[in-house]
Amino acid sequence: MPAPDRPRRRFAVVGTGSRAEMFVRAMATTHADVAVPVALVDPSPTRRAYYDELLAGHGLRAEHLGPEDLPALLDSGRVDAVVVASPDDTHADHVCAALDRGLDVVCEKPLAHDVEGLRRIGAAAERSAGELVVTFNYRYSPRNSAVRRLLADGAVGTVTGVHFEWLLDTVHGADYFRRWHREKDRSGGLLVHKATHHVDLVNWWLGDVPERVTALGGLRFYGDERAAERGLAGRPALSRDAGPGDPFALDLAADDRLRRLYLDAEGDDGYRRDQDVFAPGVTIEDTMSVLVGYRGGAALTYALSAYNPWEGYRVAVTGTEGRLELDVVERSHVPAGRTGALLGPGGKSGPAVDPSVARDEDADDPVRPFGARLVVQRQWERPRVVEIAEGAGAHGGGDALLLDDVLRGAGPDPLGRQAHYVDGVRSVAVGLCANRSMATGGTVRTADLGLPLDLPAGAR
Ligand SMILES: NC(=O)c1ccc[n+]([C@@H]2O[C@H](COP(=O)([O-])OP(=O)(O)OC[C@H]3O[C@@H](n4cnc5c(N)ncnc54)[C@H](O)[C@@H]3O)[C@@H](O)[C@H]2O)c1
């Protein structure tokens, strides 16, 4: 419900690529009573222009600016808040610029991609009157909320261990190796960029703070060296030239949205959305195993890999009084011939890259059926299935619920879903420690990063 005394906030949308669409669309439609997009900030005029049509359809117009003009815009009094949906390595500058002017910030995950950025954000957040919210939309997915509720209600007693495996398939997983995510200096690698979601879930489920981290990982599938080992050397340098039948090609021209956002915009800044996943220059891992010790004594064993034949995740929580298991299948297999995986449900054109955003019905399978199964078993009892009321839309309805919280302000929040910025720091801290551990072979303590890991007094 809208907060009755909350004025309609004027937003600058910083970074007008793919993710911005969720926010711009909401501000133009479902949340138009509380938010209005007044400025589009992006180095690419073509990507900014993509949003003009969307806004015009709702009688709206926003001014266009490059990132270099953002400070002047923030000084002008023309905006009240910013959405930061630009690449991860640009978050800290934009978040701090807005907070230092006392403006509210909605920042996409990860909060930042390195220690220095997190430190700057922490200092800016502490001295600012503005509110900083991190968009941990996975918390809002009904199945993940159900785990939080069960654990908070003591369904398995005191949690002693969490085993969490996240599988990205050769459609969604490959996509992190096509553009800026493939460079560790820009994304922090998947243990920061992607695992921030997963570690945040565990931190939130347990209500605990990660203390020490040990990790192993490497590039075992993507990249030029692995391609050479598998006899794939000599492929065309760009996936658009790879030819029909190449399951790793991404045909930007075949999808209207991707064409307009990326192919048509290449002349602006040279951003290549469809680099070959086997081309040189990949500096991130695709295979990772992490062990995390929590202050309260629980241990997390976490694995993430990016080239599986199916996509989903498995969580097992062991406690002193029982066990909880969540198994989620988002895409049971990648159908043969799905070149570029750009065919959406029903074979229609449309990006079906991330199966949590659009169900890929052609890829369902009775052996591994699409959906989630949550089972709780207490000591000396039979297992019981816990019903999950999935919502409509991306991330099991999570994105829609998140938008309410970040644009309208959190209402009653018994599960504590709205994330404090310190939650953003805690989850990235694990990824940064894991990166250090992979480099050194040792265990790294989160406290050694010098970051704010404790919620300020009075925060929920
Ligand atoms: N919560 C989620 O589930 C989720 C999903 C997707 C993306 N994201 C996050 O959203 C962000 C954007 O991801 P995306 O997939 O839209 O990427 P994208 O590459 O499609 O869009 C990023 C946009 O930022 C622009 N940009 C580049 N440098 C900039 C700068 N200095 N200032 C402002 N804009 C700049 C680019 O031109 C591009 O238009 C990332 O941080 C990503 O982690 C979150």
Image (cartoon, rainbow, N blue to C red):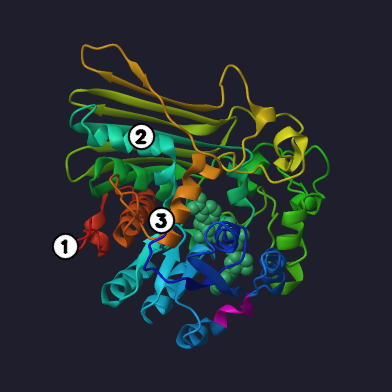
In the rendered image, the quadrant that contains the N terminus is bottom left
Q: Residues within 10 Å of mark 3 (few under 14, many from 20)?
A: many
- At label 2, the amino acid type is Ala
Q: Specify whether 49 is left or right of 16.
A: right
For the point 71% across and 61% down, the residue is 262
Q: Residue 246: x, y in percent?
A: 76, 39
- Where residue 297 sits, quadrant-wise, is top left
Q: Are marks 1 and 2 in contact (CB under 8 Å)?
A: no
Measure how far apart labels 3 and 2 are at the Cα level.
Answer: 18 Å
Residue depth check, mark 3 versus mark 2: number of the one nearer the observer: 3
- As displayed, is residue 46 above or below residue 437? below
Tell which of 153 and 443 is nearer to you: 153
Picture quadrant of ligand 1: bottom right
State whether residue 283 appears in this view: no
Task: Give the residue at mark 2.
Answer: 146
Disc on the earlier residue, 1 or 3: 3
For the point 31% across and 38% down, the residue is 148
Q: Which residues are magenta?
A: 62-68
Task: Give the residue at mark 3.
Answer: 405
Q: Specify whether 260 is left or right of 5.
A: right
Q: Residue 197: x, y in percent?
A: 42, 48
Q: Specify whether 201 is left or right of 58.
A: left
Tell which of 450 and 146 is nearer to you: 146
Q: Residues within 10 Å of mark 2 (few under 14, many from 20)?
A: many
Q: Is residue 65 magenta?
A: yes
Tell which of 400 and 304 is nearer to you: 400
In the rendered image, the quadrant that contains the C terminus is bottom left
Task: Give the residue at mark 1.
Answer: 457
For the point 70% across and 54% down, the residue is 274
- At label 1, the amino acid type is Ala
SS of the residue under disc 1: loop
Q: Is residue 179 magenta?
A: no
